[in-house]
Amino acid sequence: MTNQPKNLSPEQREELLTTLQTRFQKHMNRHEGVDWAKLKAKLETSTDKLWSLYEMERTGGEPDVIAYDATNEYLFYDCVAESPKGRRSVCYDRKAWESRKEFKPENTAMDMATDIGIELLTEEQYRHLQTLGSFDLKTSSWIQTPEAIRKLGGAVFCDRRYNTVFLYHNGAESYYAARGFRGVLRV
């Protein structure tokens, strides 16, 4: 992804805005009090953010705005039911990837997030997402790992089972077909 131009064609922009508006209207419970017209106006002046949203969508994240926060920014989270398909089978970060002697995954969660222009959800953000619906019932998602855990070789991920959000740990170099990552984008 790194070498792709970060500009959308007029057709891609219009298609993305239509998709985002449709999702916005379908899931009003995710963003009470957010005005679509104001959000759209801000998106139309944020070319780099539109590109990131396009990449979130392209990789299967189904991004939706979930808040307008105190910093006067809109927060978009990946709201697809299961961890985004185009971001699975990745280890946590470059250090973990380099530590693997064989069977290296194609990419890492942290590298992909950087390329897309997003950040992995924190535990708090992941738990907030779960108040808006039921996500990761069959998959799991890497989340931002505290430095103390990462220094020891670990990384953390979450999922939802038994109507409960669980936080787990694994070696940062591990990767599974059912584990990806969810991101947040500030606009």
Image (cartoon, grey):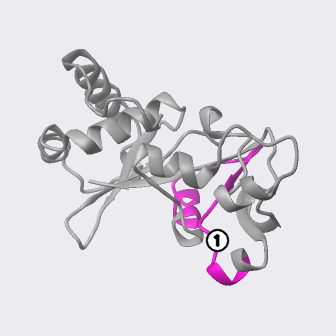
Is residue 145 shown left or right of residue 33? Answer: right
Q: Residues within 10 Å of mark 1 (few under 14, many from 20)?
A: many
Task: Give the answer, above or below, for where 75 lies relative to 104.
Answer: below
Q: In terms of depth relative to the viewer, which is nearer, 3 or 175?
A: 3
Q: Position of residue 167 (x, y in %)?
A: 74, 68
Q: Residue placed at 19% from the left, 19% from the top?
A: 10
Nearer the observer, 28 or 145: 145
Asked if residue 131 is among those painted magenta in the image, a careful observer would answer yes
Residue at (87, 50) in percent of width and height = 101
Which residue is under mark 1? 145
Q: Looking at the image, which residue is at 65% across and 42% down?
A: 107
Location of residue 178 (image quadrant): top right
Q: Quadrant of residue 23?
A: top left
Q: Position of residue 104 (x, y in %)?
A: 79, 43
Identify the residue at the far bottom of this view: 148
Q: Is residue 14 above or below residue 115?
A: above
Q: Which residues are magenta?
A: 126-149
Residue 24 in sight: no
Residue at image location 23% in from the left, 71% down from the top: 71
Residue 25: horizontal and vertical position, in percent? 32, 35
- Report the side of 138 relative to 38 (left or right): right
**Front-most of residues 64 and 116:** 116
Disc 1, SS: loop
Q: Which amino acid, mark 1? A: Thr
